[in-house]
Amino acid sequence: MRYEELTIEGRNAVLEAFRSGKTIDKLFVLDGCQDGPVRTIVREAKKYDTIINYVAKERLDQMSETGKHQGVIAYAAAYEYAEVEDMLKLAEEKGEPPFLFLLDGIEDPHNLGAIIRTANLAGAHGVIIPKRRAVGLTATVAKTSAGALNYTPVAKVTNLTATMEDLKKRGLWFVCADMGGDVMYKMNLTGPIGLVIGNEGEGVSKLVKEHCDMVASIPMKGDIDSLNASVAAGVLAYEIVRQRLAKQ
């Protein structure tokens, strides 16, 4: 399957993309530009809670593929986002306790793609990512997922901790990966669960960690102190899979 870079340039093209319902991850606008068409585009972006970046003309020129950006460039998602509710329905249809991945600020598209691939193979019902300070569903993510993005729903939420609180009311427990936690093999990771994986450099943020019910560490015997985010996700996900299989 061939994926194209989903970059939209020019005022009419960007405005039409918003009005047609296309999912726009980020909008870049020429700093200081306040004319009517640009104000209309910004208004549409705010309506959909799109991230807006005001940048210098030099930055837009560097980003532009056509040289005709007219002061606006938008990045569209390679795939449509799902709703969290869709994931819960999928679990219900399969007769399984919900198993979700929640990603706290994953910025590397290769990591996101790899995690989506792992989520699919581990039988997770979906992946939840935040709108801000995180990569969206770019063409690179789609390629790295090796087709998993066609089968695994991905939802984008405004507030990760608020989403966690809503899911707790639906019976989910949350476990996050952190070196300071208890060894994962000593934990009960069965039942409805959300696996929280943190940012590549800083790990799980303090606020998100406070909303987790369990903090799990992965035993490590080597000379360095951390795993790649996508590898950590795979290790913990398959401990959840192992425990689920053991209960059957």
Image (cartoon, rainbow, N blue to C red):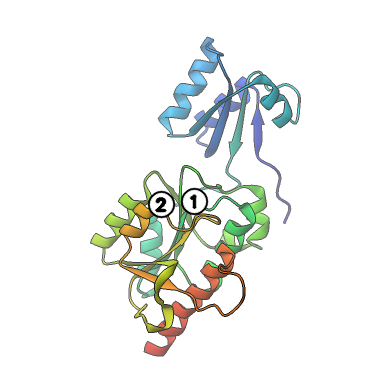
State the residue lying farthest toward the top.
Answer: 35
Residue drawn 32% across the image and 56% down it: 164
Residue 139 showing in the rendered view: yes
Q: Quadrant of the C terminus?
A: bottom left
Q: In 3D space, how far apart are the residues under numbered discs 1 and 2 (Cα atoms)?
A: 19 Å
* Of pointers 1 and 2, the one earlier in the residue sequence: 2
Q: Position of residue 208 (x, y in %)?
A: 36, 55
Q: Quadrant of residue 224?
A: bottom right
Residue in front for this viewpoint, 223 or 23: 223
Q: Quadrant of residue 220?
A: bottom right
* Residue type at numbered disc 2: Glu
Q: Position of residue 159 (x, y in %)?
A: 36, 46
State the residue lying farthest toward the left.
Answer: 169
* Residue type at numbered disc 1: Gly
Which numbered tag is attached to residue 105? 1
Q: Indicate left or right for 73 with 37 as reference.
A: right
Which numbered tag is attached to residue 223? none
Residue in front for this viewpoint, 172 or 185: 185
Q: Are there few (<14), some (14-19), or many (20+) residues within 10 Å of tag 2?
A: some
Give the structural element (helix, strand or loop) at label 2. Answer: loop
Residue drawn 69% across the image and 42% down it: 5
Residue drawn 50% across the image and 35% down it: 21
Q: Indicate left or right for 246 with 58 as reference.
A: left
Residue drawn 61% across the image and 77% down it: 222
Residue in front for this viewpoint, 44 or 219: 219
Q: Quadrant of residue 230?
A: bottom right
Q: Quadrant of the N terminus?
A: bottom right
Residue marked by disc 2: 83
Residue 117 showing in the rendered view: no
